[in-house]
Image (cartoon, rainbow, N blue to C red):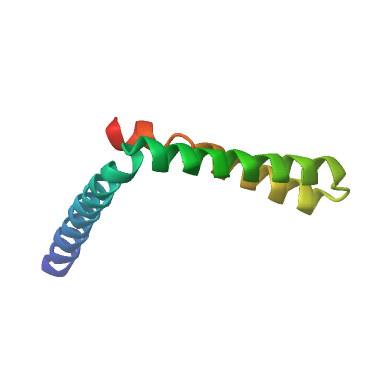
Amino acid sequence: QVNKDLQEMKMQQNQQDNVQEKKHNIGRLKGFVNNKNMYDCFILELEDQINTYQNSLLQASDLVTIHRMQGSIFALKKLKLLRDKVNG
């Protein structure tokens, strides 16, 4: 029982460490997302990549490629929300 309790305590500490690290990393992004010029260029690049994937999606003929393109578009759209997440 003591060993299980120690494992549980260690797991909880690891989870707390992960949360702290996530907050630290998000905080480090504030300078980037709040720099209008840099962030606007980033958004333009994301939109360009989304358009590229959408064009490839229109030409895709197999399900694996279609799913891959859809996943890529989804991920890029989530990145467009980075400022909201960081400043949220």
User: Closer to the camera, 38 or 64?
Assistant: 38
Q: Quadrant of the image for the C terminus?
A: top left
Percent coordinates x, y for residue 66 in the rendering: 77, 46
Residue extending farthest to the front is 37
> Picture quarter containing residue 48?
top right
Residue sitting nearer the eye, 39 or 57: 39
Residue visible at 84% across and 47% down? 60
Is 45 drawn above or below residue 83 in the view shown? below
- How many marks do you count on the picture? 0
Would residue 53 be found to the left or right of residue 40 on screen?
Answer: right
Determine the residue positioned at 25% across, 50% down. 28
Locate residue 13: give its quadrant.
bottom left
Q: Position of residue 51 (x, y in %)?
A: 69, 39
Residues 26 and 17: in front is 26
Q: Residue at x 11, y 67 (%)?
A: 2
Tell me where residue 35 appears, x and y as whole percent.
Answer: 33, 39
Asked if 42 appears above or below 65 in the picture, the reply is: above
Q: Give the x, y percent position of residue 4.
A: 18, 64
On screen, residue 44 versus residue 37, left or right, reads right
Which residue is situated farthest in the bottom direction here?
A: 3
Q: Quadrant of the N terminus?
A: bottom left
